[in-house]
Image (tube, grey):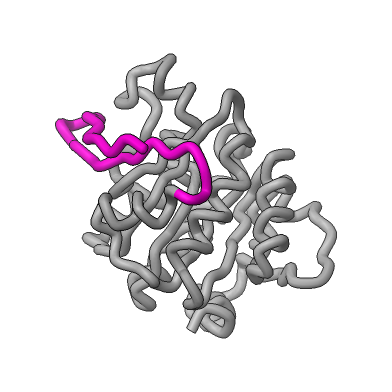
Amino acid sequence: MLVRQLSLKRGVTVGAANIADNNEIQEALTRLGLPHPKNVIVLIGGAGGIGFLDKFPMRKAVGIVAQLAEETGSVVVDGGTQAGIMTEIGRQRKRNNFSFPLVGVVFDSLIMKEDPASILDPNHTLFFLIPGEDWGDESGWISKIATAIASGMKSITVLINGGNISRQDVEYSLMENRPTFVMRGTGRMADEITLTGNIHPVDIFRKSEEIIATLRTKLV
């Protein structure tokens, strides 16, 4: 395992841990200084391909996740790149001066090929760099890292918009017995995925405080 500092946009420097297997997750959390166990929100969904009409409900949904994380002292875990919901959660965290930890999980070969400053969202607070060669390789790791951070505390997954990889993300969360909330009305996968078992629909056009109350039922 390698723990290092990454230089991102606007002169931001953040800690990152390269890990090779599950056994290194707990040590990485300690060396990165992330307090745990803590409640966790796994944020999955749209990176690219978010339609113009979906952007407003997407931003509302991400804002709800950010507010919920701040109010409950939860850690948010996502894909960590400069795209879609990941950029938006970082932007809203910064804009509102929120303090919740925001953890990005990215496959390491992407960082080897590109300058981290051109790939990673600078408003995230730390990163896990995991084995992988292509988009979607991070899905299982996001779920495992979230479970390690929670370590017996509560955790939920929230799907906002999303493409084909999002279905895989949902499956990994369900394998961890993590309640998954689907933000209906944010477009694409969130509006199409079949509702079964531990998948709970939430209408994004409800009042924000009502949605937060719904999400809290499984988080606290």
Along the horizontal axis of the image, is 195 left or right of 75?
A: right
- Front residue of 111/160: it is 111
Along the horizontal axis of the image, is 90 left or right of 97?
A: right
Q: Is residue 188 above or below residue 33?
A: above
Along the horizontal axis of the image, is 139 left or right of 96?
A: right
On the image, which quarter does residue 69 sit in?
bottom left
Residue furthest out toward the top: 113
Q: Residue at x 29, y 57 (%)?
A: 30
- Residue 56 visible at all: no
Residue 68 in percent (x, y) is at 42, 72
- Residue 130 visible at all: yes
What is the magenta range?
1-23
Q: Residue at x 34, y 40 (%)?
A: 17
Residue furthest out toward the left: 11
Residue 125 in percent (x, y) is at 28, 49
Quarter that holds the N terminus: top left
- Front residue of 175/180: it is 175
Q: Residue at x 65, y 71 (%)?
A: 179
Query: Is 72 included in the stretch rendered in magenta?
Result: no
Residue 58 in percent (x, y) is at 55, 52
Along the horizontal axis of the image, is 128 left or right of 181?
A: left
Q: Is residue 47 above or below residue 151?
A: above
Q: Is residue 197 above or below residue 51?
A: below
Residue 214 in percent (x, y) is at 58, 81
Q: Residue at x 49, y 43 (%)?
A: 79
User: How many circles with numbers are drawn on the protein?
Assistant: 0
Q: Is residue 111 above or below residue 208?
A: above
- Front residue of 213/118: it is 118
